[in-house]
Image: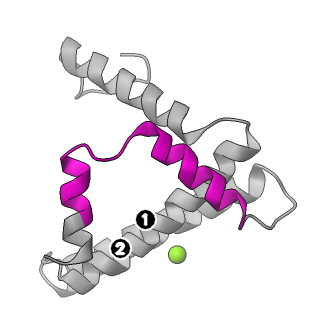
Amino acid sequence: MNSLEKDAKNFMQGKYSMSDFNSYQRSAATTAIYTDKVVYPALGLVGEAGEVANKVKKVLRDKDGVFTSEDRDAIAKEIGDVLWYCAALATDLELTLGYIASQNELKLSKRKANGTIGGSGDNR
Ligand SMILES: [Mg+2]
């Protein structure tokens, strides 16, 4: 089992908590060096999300959708970049990732209970 698989297993076993998000956010803030608050991380977030999508696209195009461990590792790094920009954007907006994650978890659990996971609209 490689480190990526071990980490995924730990995650699935609930060995992380919402406070881990805040800990990561504090760490990310130490490497946030930019002046255009909010705008810079919002643009960076979209750019990095595009890098994730591009790597997935290339696996679909060139490898029949079969993800190697190298592909997964490369995509994990891009998801990490997305996470960093999420943390920076949250910090600039005076929000915490822990709050955002818990609110998202609450929203989705309500949708699941109501049978509205599928469909569209922010307030279902
Ligand atoms: Mg990147």
Residue stretch in magenta:
7-31
Q: Main secondary structure of the magenta part?
A: helix
Residue drawn at 63 percent across, 59 percent down: 27
Q: Is mark 2 within 8 Å of ligand 1?
A: no
Residue drawn at 76 percent across, 53 percent down: 39
On the image, the x and y values in percent for residue 106 come to: 37, 22
- Residue sitting at the far top: 114
Q: Amino acid at mark 2?
A: Ile
Q: Amino acid at mark 1?
A: Ile
Q: Is residue 93 left or right of residue 57?
A: right
> Relative to 115, does residue 118 appear above or below in the rendering?
below
Q: Is residue 72 left or right of residue 22?
A: left
Residue where numbered disc 2 is placed: 75
Residue drawn at 76 percent across, 49 percent down: 38
> Relative to 58, does residue 6 appear above or below in the rendering?
above
Queried whether the magenta region covers residue 30, the answer comes back as yes
Residue drawn at 26 percent across, 71 percent down: 4
